[in-house]
Image (cartoon, helix red, strand yellow):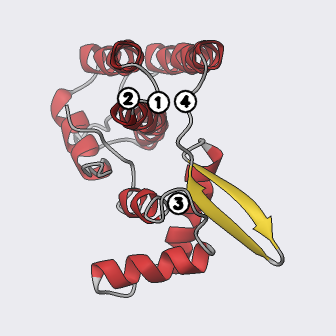
Amino acid sequence: MKPILTDKYDNLILQITSLVSGHWTESKTAIWKEISRITGMEVNKKAVFDRINHLESVGFLESKSDMNRKQYRRKDTADSHLEFIQIMKNFEVNQKTELERIKKLKKITKVNGKLSKAGKELLDHVQGEVDRAYMMIVRVGYQSQLGIIPNDIGNERIEALEDYIDVIMNALQKKYDKEVMKEYFQNHVKRLEFKI
């Protein structure tokens, strides 16, 4: 299985923040400029900054303040066993919430077969949960490749995260029109290969 990141900039941000083996990347602006250089086009500065904030909030990046500037680097430390158990407990709480929403919403489409507002909100929320789980899969896979965690532990963690995703997706598929969901998820998931 190829790891999936949720945004077209995530892969590049993580690549850039690890280029100088453990050194700090100058700033968000420096990361944005490097992405523009790599892609050969002017990219949306706000979108890159938002993704940097997101990657920091989910533990993929760490930051420090140096004078007036905040510097970043990819966080290459593994969660302890207890930290991972807590992460999975949080995922399970979110999973129960998603399953309740699925149980309560009878249909996700209008009479004409198009996605209803409530259906879109449900799928958007599910997509957010799936994205968070995929981000963890990428992180664990990366840590396993670097030898930060043993391969067997990495595989166990990835399997637990995949099971989490499968439970939600199976509940959706059992209840709602598969074609509508297929169209929604194909249009909303960005598949990017994670490069080290």
Residue linked to disc 4: 78
Residue linked to disc 3: 51
3D distance between C-alphas at marks 1 and 2: 6 Å
Residue 18, placed above or below residue 157: below
Residue at horizontal 59%, vertical 42%? 58
Residue linked to disc 1: 148
The location of residue 144, given as percent across then percent down, is 38, 29
Residue at horizontal 27%, vertical 37%? 111
Q: Are marks 1 and 2 in contact (CB under 8 Å)?
A: yes
Q: Are marks 4 and 1 in contact (CB under 8 Å)?
A: yes
Res 114 seen here? no
Residue linked to disc 2: 144
Of mark 4 and mark 3, the one earlier in the sequence is: 3
Residue 49 falls in image quadrant:
bottom right
Of mark 4 and mark 2, the one earlier in the sequence is: 4
Q: Nearer the viewer, residue 82 or 132?
A: 82
The location of residue 135, given as percent across then percent down, is 44, 39
Element under disc 2: helix
3D distance between C-alphas at marks 2 and 3: 24 Å
10 Å neighbourhood of mark 4: few (<14), some, or many (≥20)? some
3D distance between C-alphas at marks 4 and 2: 9 Å
The amino acid sitting under disc 3 is: Arg
